[in-house]
Image (tube, rainbow, N blue to C red):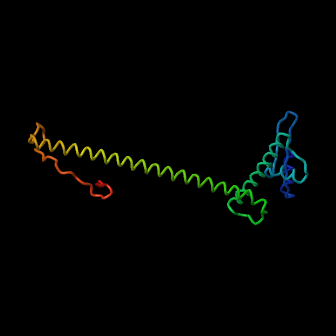
Amino acid sequence: NGIIKKAQELTILCNARVSLVIFNTNNKLYEFHSHCLKKMLKDYQEKSGNKLWDAKHQYLQDEVNRIKKENDSMQLELRHLKGEDLNSLTAKELYPIELLLDNGITKVREKQMEIHNKMEKRDRMMEEENKLLHLKLQQLMNVNVNANARDLKHGYQQKDEDYPYQMPFIYRVQPTQPNLQDNK
């Protein structure tokens, strides 16, 4: 306890950063840190040049540094593709970017054409379906006209149904929109 008390006094009197770790003979841990231990260890490594990492941790640190560099490189490349920071590039460095952009434009145009072709195909299918439906409607109307004419020819007889006498359907109804009328 005495040494921990002295470490506290040094921290206060000398305005110093102190870290104290003690293991007794029974492996019991005693510690005192005036500031964040991680920051103090980092500062120690930077000032002394001594590495406190083992090989596994050093490998992980190297991997983190490699990924940071790769990330920075990719961010720079992305800025270049966006058209930013191009003044610092040479013609040789601009050429691959130009190829990438040309390739991108080609793919966008291909996708546009694909979508356009799909839309045209869908429009043709809808027109064909519309013609078929119009033809079926025409046939149904002709069947109704023929049936009503037959009923008139033989005299219209009301069947045993729950609704009152109906006027036979003898007039053919024309659609009011010009694009739906028959071209006769």
| Residue at 80% from the left image edge and 43% from the top image edge | 60
Q: Is residue 124 left or right of residue 176?
A: right
Give the residue drawn at x 82%, y 44%. 31
Which is more toward the observer, 174 or 161? 174
Q: Where's residue 75, x and y in %?
A: 72, 56
- Seen at 86% across and 50% down, the residue is 7
User: Which of the pair 115/32 is nearer the observer?
Assistant: 115
x and y, in percent, of residue 156 in the image = 10, 42
Quadrant containing the N terminus is: top right
Q: Position of residue 53 (x, y in %)?
A: 85, 43
Q: Which of the image's four quarters has the C terminus?
A: bottom left
Quadrant in which residue 87 is drawn = bottom right
Q: Is residue 32 above or below residue 160?
A: below
Work out which residue is located at the far bottom of the displayed protein and give it.
87
Quadrant assignment, res 94: bottom right
Q: Nearer the viewer, residue 96 or 171?
A: 171
